Image: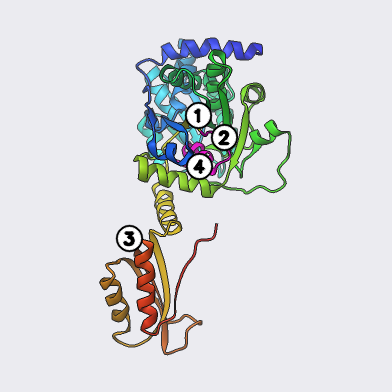
Amino acid sequence: MSRIIDYIYEHILRADSVLDGVIHRTPLDKTRTFSEMTKANVYLKLENLQKTGSFKARGAYYKISSLSDEEKKRGVIAASAGNHAQGVAYAAKMAGAHAKIVMPVFAPIAKILATRSYGAEVVLHGYVFDDSLKKALEIAEAEKRQFIHAFDDEYIIAGQGTIGLEILREIPNPDVIIVPIGGGGLISGISIAVKKRNPEVKIIGVQSKAFPAAYELKKGVTMEKKAWSTIADGIAVKKPGKITSEVISELVDDVVLVDDNDVSRAIFLLLERGKILAEGAGAISVGALISGQIDVENKNVVAVISGGNIDFTLLSKIISRESIRMRRLVKIRTIIPDRPGSLSKIITLLAKARMNIIDIITERYDFRAPPYEASLEIIVEVPEEKKLQELLSHIREQGYHVEIEEVKE
């Protein structure tokens, strides 16, 4: 292994001691749901339960704790629109250093308030992360503050690597560890910690198809068509760092790509089956697992759930979308006569079928319907497919043409 990897490993061992009592030693939870789905022994490393809601507090604290008293006195600065902001804010407060965080002006208000709640000063600048980063570097130079990089720093990587040590304490010989990749700090730290002790463990990285830089690095390819957004926004990084690229190239066994459909499904299943709240970047490891791209049958598998700071509006959309995809919620569409009593007939049929109505939308100005009729859309909860088909038959027997909105993936 290269000299930088040996150097970081020594710091991982130190960080493990430094972080004791500062961060949570998060659970490694065996999940029956995903074990049965994949025919493997699946464990979830729940960094969504970490301080600030993600793994970021580990590396940030170890980095800040390494600063001299004079450097801490001058303060630290970072640029982030999400988890790194909160991790640095928390770590700086614990280490007794003042933190200034530059965030885009359109950063979610919940994340701005959370960052401030840890005692950091928030500077809103620019419309995208690159604008915030440029401003942060300007402030760092002008105020002589220590800039805290989100991933491309030996101390940051070492802090994240303590997750690998924790995994090995509970499962000394895992077969596969699945880790999200954004800038690469998390997977670099875990890879070094694990491979140094057990080189046989397979480390599999996961990226969004929208941001496949590490995949391209590992495979030696260039993707022809890329999306410009993803619900896994925490790993929406254009390219890994210099240090992390070296570690990924040497230690990571493979990188797979996952689309937002698999991520959405993973978020939903984690919440419904495991009562685990995960953000897109945190759930993407499970998304890769259930996509079937990784050979895990009859193996001991650890999926790292890297964070749980999901926007509740997005979460609501995901729950509704997945409920419709799984036909838990169904949109029934029909055309009814635009006169009193027409709607009540449909509702009576739904009541007899014991279908819970979530929403009713009528449209008198739908050009697909004649002037004397109105379009009707009803969203209902479906207990089982058989009941749904019986309901549709009863509606059609009353002379209505009815259709179900199908989800296209």
Image position, residue 216 (x, y; %): 69, 36
- Tag count: 4
For the C terminus, which image quadrant? bottom right
Q: What distance separates the C-alpha of mark 3 from that of mark 4?
A: 25 Å
The residue that label 3 is drawn on is 383
Tell me which label, 3 or 2, sits earlier in the chain. 2
Q: Which image quarter holds the N terminus?
A: top right
* Marks 1,2: beta carbons within 8 A: yes
Q: Nearer the viewer, residue 24 or 288?
A: 288
Is 184 above or below relative to 407? above
Which residue corresponds to mark 1?
299
Could you tell me which secondary element the residue under label 2 belongs to? loop
Q: CA distance from mark 1 to mark 2?
A: 9 Å
Q: Which mark is residue 295?
A: 2
Q: Badge 4 local density, few (<14 within 10 Å), some, or many (20+)?
A: some
Q: How is the image coloured?
A: rainbow
Depth check: give the residue in front, 233 or 30. Answer: 30
The answer to whether residue 406 is seen in the rendering is yes
Mark 3 and mark 1: span between their CA atoms?
35 Å
Residue at 43 percent across and 25 percent down: it is 57
> Residue 369 appears at what percent x and percent y?
47, 84
Which residues are drawn in magenta?
Answer: 279-297
Q: Residues within 10 Å of mark 1 (few under 14, many from 20)?
A: some
Between discs 4 and 1, the one toward the N terminus: 4
Q: CA distance from mark 3 to mark 2?
A: 34 Å
User: Measuring 57% from the left and 36% from the top, which residue is drawn there?
Assistant: 294
Q: To which residue does mark 4 refer?
A: 290
- Residue 295, magenta (yes or no): yes
Asked if the residue at tag 4 contacts the one at tag 3, i.e. Cβ–Cβ closer than 8 Å, the answer is no
Instruction: Determine contact: label 3, label 2, CB under 8 Å.
Output: no
Decide: is 127 above or below 155. below
Residue 22 appears left or right of 69: left
